[in-house]
Image (cartoon, helix red, strand yellow):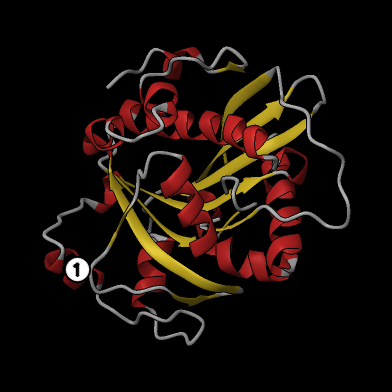
Amino acid sequence: MTEQDTPSPGQSESASASAGERKEPQRPKNLTLEVLEADSPRAELARQLETQVLGEAFGNTPEQLRKEYGPYEAASTFLLVFDEEAQKPAGMFRFIHNSSAGLKTINDIESNDPRYPWHRSFDEVLERNGLEFDRDRVLDIGVVVIAPEYQGRHESRDVAYALYRGLYAYSKATDREAWIAVLDDGVLKYTQQEMGAPFQTFEGLESGPYIDSPASTPVYAVVADLPERVSHARDQGFYRKCILGEELPYVEIPSELDRIRP
């Protein structure tokens, strides 16, 4: 699931909706990107933001989210963007590693559960699209969230660039070959138009209602292809900031990720 305000970034059912009125956002000036394993105490900040924003955007209850993500909890890693000046989370990613529970996106594509519309063999989908993925080298983007206070057009981009820089650098540092996700169509449209179109859709998997999102689409990105793919975008922000790691003076990134380049 993924949430972001449209036209701002955010779900794989991602959620970035606000409840009630909100103040005019201020662009963050001092962000820290953190990589947090599931058992890290600070991962609870990411979970709290996940619960808050998905609840506001899609009506997901904590019980629903535990049912959806509980089987993958031990195999989850969180990227958290923390606003040091305001002392609160600004955005988060949950991505899921392969484990005995499998990858959520693949399980949901193959499931016969009526909440998931596809009911397809993922191996057959890959074959139809001329793709081969080693599931142990795939990162499944389970949740993308931008906090409501950061959902103005520029603010959301600032936070999203920090998150995607972290995701790309983490993927390179850990030898991942692909990302997969099920993205809410509003989030997918924003990401493709405003963030350099990093994702591709699977032929044979159409948009459909997914959990509490009225329309979501399975997508993928091949990590090795990303520099070439996004370098031709009209807006070079994603390429410069997320791939090259440039022009992010407002974000403190862990040194082991900050030095990663294509």
- Which residue is drawn at the image coordinates 78% and 40% (left, top)? 149
Say which element carries label 1. helix
Residue 46 position, x and y percent, is 67, 42
Q: Is residue 189 left or right of residue 174?
A: right
Mark 1 lies on residue = 123
Q: Given the current orientation, which residue lies at the most extreme front position?
A: 234
Q: Is residue 138 left or right of residue 191?
A: left
- Which residue is drawn at the image coordinates 70% and 35% (left, top)? 90
> Is residue 119 depicted above or below 134 in this figure?
below
Res 199 seen here: yes
Between 105 and 208, the residue placed more toward the observer is 208
- Which residue is drawn at the image coordinates 15% and 56% (left, top)? 131
Residue 18 position, x and y percent, is 78, 54
Between 15 and 177, the residue placed more toward the observer is 15
Q: Is residue 226 left or right of residue 155?
A: left
Res 101 seen here: no
* Category of crowding for the residue at label 1, using alpha-carbon neighbours closer than 10 angstroms: few (below 14), some (14–19), many (at least 20): some
How many marks are shown on the rendered structure? 1
- Which residue is drawn at the image coordinates 69% and 43% (left, top)? 151
Instruction: Report which quarter residue 119 is drawn in.
Output: bottom left
Instruction: Report which quarter residue 172 is drawn in.
Output: top left
Between 223 and 138, the residue placed more toward the observer is 223
Residue 5 position, x and y percent, is 65, 51
Residue 137 position, x and y percent, is 28, 44
What amino acid type should be assigned to the residue bearing mark 1?
Asp
Q: In the rendered image, which quarter contains the C terminus?
A: top left
Q: In the rendered image, which quarter contains the N terminus?
A: bottom right
